[in-house]
Image (spheres, rainbow, N blue to C red):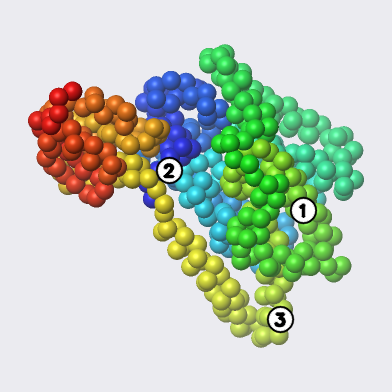
Amino acid sequence: MPIALWDESRLAVNAAEMLNNGNWLVTHFDGKPDLWNAKPPLLIWIQASLFWLFGMNEVTLRLPSALAGLATAGLLAWFGVRVLRSPLVGLFSALVLLTTSGYIDRHITRTGDYDTLLVFFTTWYVLSFYRYLEEGHRRSLWHTGIGITLAILTKSVVGAFFLPALLLYTIATRKLLPLLRQRDFYIMAAGILVAVALYYVPREFVSPGYWQAVYDNELGGRLGKSEIGLVSTWTWYLDMLIQDELLPWLYVYPIGFFALLHPAAPPKYRRLALLLVICVAFLLTVISYSATKYFWYEAPIYPLCALVAGAGLAVIAEVIVTHLRAGSRPWAVILFIVCVFAWPAKIIWDECFYNEYESDTLFGKYIRHQAKEYGQIDSYTLLTGLGYDSSMLFSRLAAMREYDHTVRVLYYWQILDLRQGETVIVCNPKMRTQVDSLFQTNAVFEESPCATLLLLAPKVNR
């Protein structure tokens, strides 16, 4: 899948320029400080480091998302084993997460965006805080603080969205006053503030106007006004979750809540159910009232919902294997997993190979193929038919770094800047038609819909 326009490709440009210019504090886009993407650069740091280690390409760009997605599933499995003392709940929760349609989607685990890393950190700190209140281990409180800090440094204020929910849960379980008596709590809170300030304060000093950009893009602007001018109903997220994103596991949730709330279940199961409901309800309420709505805003709830479905599947599996001999129970569990997860896994697999993309995002793949099959071309112009094409800009940066090519870029309104003798790469059929109308051309390399054209004599006087 080519690098997507807007967010993913813009992050790719941020990471590539950070590696090239050596400025690890201020993210840049097209050579200028980036005040449109005002989020902290934790993900950009990781991506830039991976570019340095493994090269600039789609796989390297998306590696943090893939690893964070797997790590979140592993975190659920660990939580089930170590905290809930139920390996089946942990196993099924992890498998549910990895076969949830909304989680294995664009802008989340399938692309190099912020959200999968954010989900890992928010899940980490929510579950760590739950464990701290249950068991009182200081280490769990430190994990909570580290998770909150990294979540904020990943996606700004969004990383802290679960904090009011954790406060409500602490009040509901009558553990607020004991928490406030703990010195470690204040050390943790101070550590979070200091760590976050160590980025935000220098960034404003070096790039004035950054704090205003944070407010405009991360706080008041998106909450009060739709970023793209679309009006959605308050139930937009609920409708998506019910009709698509949580399928097919939505139907297992009643059994999951039955398992967690059953009188015979350990009390900590009931408290976990309360925590999950509060967190999911709070986040959905906040993003539903926001004027700007995108489907990936709901991503942090997927692991929490997976825990509920995992508990339900564990109950079903236990009912089935209880009546079997001890020696055959492991095989019965394996058969149960295959029967339950085979079809959802196939659906996810098929969706991963169904892609919609603009032809103008194919420059990167085409340049790599051209360099491998026809390496003589090392100086050319990329011509896009789009008015904004950050994917093309990343392809240019990657070609310059990986192959030492000389590359310039032109947008459709700059087509008259082309000159006789120039080599131009086009992937948009309409742009190729326009080029052919202006020049006699020779296609020196081609892989539909992209082509490398040598511009010969002009057809019209300009």
Question: Residue 203 lies in what quarter of the image?
Answer: top right
- Location of residue 391 (image quadrant): top left
Residue at 66% x, 59% y is: 242
Q: Which residue is mark 1?
A: 277
Residue 385 found in image quarter: top left
To which residue does mark 3 refer?
A: 322
Residue 162 in view in this figure: no
The location of residue 233, given as percent across then percent down, is: 68, 47
Please say if the residues under marks 2 and 1 sit with CB atoms less than 8 Å apart.
no
Of the 4 image quadrants, the one containing the C terminus is top left
x 26%, y 48%: residue: 449
Foreground: disc 3 or disc 1: 1
Mark 2 or 1, closer to the camera? 2
At a point 59% along the width and 51% down the height, the residue shown is 72
In the displayed structure image, the side of residue 263 where residue 294 appears, left or right = left
Q: Which residue is mark 2?
A: 4
State the SS at label 3.
Answer: helix
- When the figure is inspected, residue 352 is found, relative to residue 228, above or below; the finding is below
- Taking the view exactly as shown, the residue that stands out farthest to the left is 457
